[in-house]
Amino acid sequence: MLIRRERSDDVDAIRTVTARAFDGRPYSNGSEAPLVDALRADRGWIPALSMVAEVGGAVVGHVVCTRATISGQPALGLGPLSVDPAWQQRGVGSALVHAMLGGADALGEPVVVLLGDPAYYHRFGFQLAAEYGIDPPVPQWAPNFQARALSTYRPDLRGPFEYAAPFQDS
Ligand SMILES: CC(C)(COP(=O)(O)OP(=O)(O)OC[C@H]1O[C@@H](n2cnc3c(N)ncnc32)[C@H](O)[C@@H]1OP(=O)(O)O)[C@@H](O)C(=O)NCCC(=O)NCCS
């Protein structure tokens, strides 16, 4: 498995992998694949932080971080994260998250924030965002709203979190 940046010829495969990963999940409304396309067209898109997992030339997973803010200061929002069902439980998701955190840290980003299952993300160093004083856009998200501090994180980075604009429509 290789982890690398998204290329322009990956777009269709990313859309397919995203749709397959979320298909039938109780927490999905089918908006994730169109959301990736909308994010790519948005000013919050960061080309270095859209990564695919490739096996034998095929895209089997994808993760993206886009520009978000905390009290108006730059931060990252992670998601969607998708692994093709045929390739789940083999470490692909973990490889993508580790690569993303390393890339974000290398770029000097202070923090990665996401909405997800703490049982999965705890292993990557995510903690409830509330512990950092980072408030979700929807208060009910609090039990699943998590943050991972990176090297340049400072404790005064706190307050309301806002995703890139396309998340509001998804
Ligand atoms: C979540 C997802 C990305 C994980 O990818 P993956 O390649 O299967 O993950 P890995 O193989 O790296 O890790 C598998 C481990 O994570 C655990 N895991 C996967 N999803 C989990 C969840 N929702 N809650 C708790 N643990 C979870 C597995 O039990 C396994 O644990 P183990 O290592 O102790 O056996 C993948 O299942 C997926 O695409 N799901 C559908 C889309 C989705 O939910 N995306 C994330 C939304 S925030």
Image: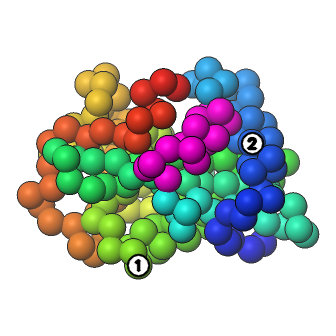
Whether residue 44 is in magenta: the answer is yes
> In this view, which residue lies farthest toward the bottom?
106
What's the distance in space between the residues labelled 2 and 1, CA to CA?
Answer: 27 Å
Magenta stretch bounds: 32-45
User: From the viewer's perspective, is 139 left or right of 159?
Assistant: right
Identify the residue shown where x is 77% and y is 57%: 10
Residue 97 visible (yes or no):
yes
Give the structural element (helix, strand or loop) at label 1.
helix
Instruction: Residue 87: give its label.
Output: none
Task: Assign the N terminus to one quadrant of the image.
Answer: bottom right
Identify the residue shown where x is 80% and y is 47%: 12
- Along the viewing direction, whichever of 126 and 163 lies nearer the viewer: 163
Q: Relative to residue 34, is residue 88 depicted above or below?
A: below
Give the structural element (helix, strand or loop) at label 2.
helix
Amino acid type of the residue tagged 2 in the rendering:
Arg
Q: Look at the numbered disc 1 and say if its residue's Cβ is closer than 8 Å to ligand 1.
A: no
Q: Relative to residue 141, is residue 75 depicted above or below?
A: below
- Along the viewing direction, whichever of 107 and 24 lies nearer the viewer: 107
Q: Which residue is mark 1?
A: 106
Instruction: Residue 15: give its label.
Output: 2
* Badge 2 or badge 1: first in the primary sequence: 2
